[in-house]
């Protein structure tokens, strides 16, 4: 008997139709057999001994250049490329979008639709979608910034209730506002069902004079999301902020009682206010009877009594426009994109841009990527494990399926997105990851030798498209794709010594193990 189509089927078919509607005469099955990001016919190789400036830009503003991408940016111009990436809505990414709809269904669903979906399915889709985007999206700068804000507003999907709500948070909070304004991003995060669950905001209420508000989210809002631990706030400010936030909660309106409760207040769906809407299930809801509507004083500024849900906006205006927030957020951005520790002068100038533009993230990022400090920071940052894995896949032009082998590697390396156990997010400094360097070599070897399941790398084809003879080329001839420069004498000697030791191995192509050595070498661990 034929199954009746569900709401999720309709959404999936509709999204696929939209993806193909822009392709005249395109057959819906074409993308299934084609590469997400096919290699260009000709791949130029850099010839300098120093790291190329364009390669450096792509190493920070993307998850690492794919073969041929440096040459494309050189033709386009770095300023034009940065502007292109700062407007991701104008970049056509239909192949990836279609793949995500077909293979990562739950990341497009509403929390209510995921209540009956096993957690392991949602987790698999989240992991696959995150990895597929990082490896294959053409909107690379947006993806890099999405990764940054995912850490900044960290949510561990291991907490009960976060698994089914994180997909909505990822697309409607983090990804939507990754290159928007900081104030809008914080506002959307404050009312995200996933954040309300993770930091106990939904439990924050004051129904009687004796009841104490739950201060968990208020503290992290100040310490981690806006002002920073040295932002000048006090414990009293935290409690006053918690009072401002009382009444905001999250409910799945699957019962008549919940539905009527939502009708009495206000609900937010995907960041938009919806009043008296019984279909606003799975959204943030304001319950007036839970709110402390008295006067509050936060960091010396008075929020008058009677503000109701507007107390949230008053609070966010205070913390988002505070000078400490500009410095704290910009110092983290500098550490991620430029250098760690962050150069003081660059933090100062970035904070000035942040303040002048009312937290316009695009303008701050543009300022950082075009700064002298950025140009002078080549090869100084150690890659975190996720970037290492993704940059290796991109450097060799891999067709990643983001399957279990890659996720297993990230698990061993200690860096699976959305799985950090505390709200401060995965650390930026390299020391916590130093104990997993052996697993980097293991991943490099599996990738180069074709042991990552359906994920494929065609080294013979890549070598030929670089204008090299696969029968005579050395692995170090491909170093410019990985390092942004030609191999040093020491690097060539290391690979040559290895090849001499493995002289009995069959030839006929670039030695896969030699390429793995290049991926595991110190030069590829930094960017």
Image: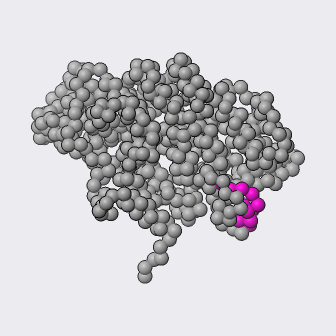
Quadrant where the C terminus sits is top left
Taking the magenta stretch, the answer to whether it contains residue 129 is no
Q: Is residue 523 toward the left or the right of residue 462 in the image?
A: right
Q: Is residue 428 visible?
A: no
- The percent position of residue 167, horizontal first and vertical second, equals 53, 53
Observer-nearest residue: 117 or 99? 99
Q: In the image as oriented, which residue stretches furthest toward the top? A: 345
**Region in magenta:** 257-268
Is residue 265 located in the magenta-colored stretch of the structure? yes
Q: Residue furthest right?
A: 209
Q: Is residue 12 left or right of residue 516?
A: right
Q: Quadrant of the N terminus?
A: bottom left
Q: Give the residue drawn at x 49%, y 41%.
A: 146
Q: Compared to 113, does 456 lie above or below? A: above
Name the residue nearer the viewer: 259 or 457.
Answer: 259
Q: Position of residue 506 (x, y in %)?
A: 13, 41
Colouring mode (rainbow / by chain / secondary structure / one colour): one colour
* Left/right of residue 113 with respect to residue 55 in the rendered view: right
> Residue 455 location, x and y as percent?
31, 49
The residue furthest bottom is: 1
Residue at 51% across, 45% down: 175
Q: Position of residue 436 (x, y in %)?
A: 42, 34
Which residue lies at the image location 64% right of the left edge and 43% below the top edge?
187
Question: What residue appears at the point 79 percent right and 29 percent down from the top-left corner?
Answer: 300
- Vertical order, 318 against 196 (above or below): above
Q: Is residue 356 left or right of residue 482?
A: right
Residue 210 visible: yes
């Amino acid at each position: 008997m034929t199954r009746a189509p569900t709401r999720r089927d309709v959404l999936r078919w509709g999204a696929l139709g939209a993806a193909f509607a822009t392709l005249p005469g395109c057959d819906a099955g074409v993308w299934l057999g084609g590469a997400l990001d096919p290699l260009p016919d000709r791949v130029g190789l850099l010839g300098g001994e120093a790291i190329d400036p364009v390669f450096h830009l792509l190493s920070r503003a993307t998850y690492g250049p794919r073969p041929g991408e440096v040459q494309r940016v050189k033709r386009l111009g770095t300023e034009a490329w940065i502007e292109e990436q700062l407007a991701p809505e104008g970049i056509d990414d239909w192949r990836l979008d279609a793949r995500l709809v077909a293979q990562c269904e739950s990341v497009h669903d509403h929390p209510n639709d995921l209540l009956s979906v096993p957690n392991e399915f949602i987790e698999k889709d989240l992991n696959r979608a995150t990895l597929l985007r990082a490896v294959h999206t053409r909107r690379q700068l947006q993806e890099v910034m999405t990764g940054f804000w995912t850490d900044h507003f960290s949510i561990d999907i291991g907490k009960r209730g976060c698994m089914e709500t994180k997909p909505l948070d990822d697309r409607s909070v983090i990804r939507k506002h990754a290159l928007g304004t900081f104030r809008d991003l914080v506002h959307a995060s404050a009312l995200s069902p996933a954040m309300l669950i993770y930091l106990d905001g939904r439990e924050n209420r004051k129904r009687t004079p004796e009841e104490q508000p739950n201060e968990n989210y208020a503290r992290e809002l100040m310490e981690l999301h806006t002002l920073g631990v040295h932002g000048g706030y006090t414990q009293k400010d935290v409690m006053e902020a918690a009072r401002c936030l009382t009444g905001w909660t999250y409910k799945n309106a699957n019962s008549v009682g919940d539905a009527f409760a939502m009708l009495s207040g206000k609900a937010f769906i995907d960041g938009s206010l919806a009043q008296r809407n019984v279909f606003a299930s799975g959204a943030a809801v304001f319950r007036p009877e839970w709110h402390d509507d008295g006067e509050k004083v936060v960091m010396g500024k008075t929020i008058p009594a009677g503000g109701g849900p507007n107390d949230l906006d008053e609070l966010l205006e205070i913390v988002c426009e505070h000078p400490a927030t500009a410095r704290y957020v910009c110092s983290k951005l500098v550490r991620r994109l430029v250098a760690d520790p962050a150069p003081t002068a660059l933090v100062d100038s970035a904070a000035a841009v942040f303040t002048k533009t009312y937290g316009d993230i695009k303008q701050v990022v543009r300022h950082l990527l075009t700064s002298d400090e950025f140009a002078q920071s080549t090869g100084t940052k150690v890659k975190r494990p996720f970037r290492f894995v993704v940059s290796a896949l991109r450097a060799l032009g891999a067709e990643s399926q983001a399957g279990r082998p890659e996720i297993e590697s990230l698990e061993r390396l200690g860096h699976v997105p959305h799985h950090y156990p505390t709200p401060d997010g995965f650390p930026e400094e390299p020391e916590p990851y130093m104990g997993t360097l052996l697993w980097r070599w293991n991943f490099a070897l599996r990738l180069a030798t074709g042991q990552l399941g359906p994920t494929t790398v065609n080294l013979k084809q890549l070598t030929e498209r670089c204008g090299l003879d696969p029968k005579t080329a050395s692995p170090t001839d491909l170093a410019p794709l990985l390092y942004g420069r030609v191999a040093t004498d020491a690097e060539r000697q290391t690979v040559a010594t290895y090849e001499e030791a493995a002289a009995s191995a069959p030839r006929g192509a670039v030695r896969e193990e030699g390429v793995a050595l290049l991926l595991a070498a110190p030069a590829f661990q930094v960017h």
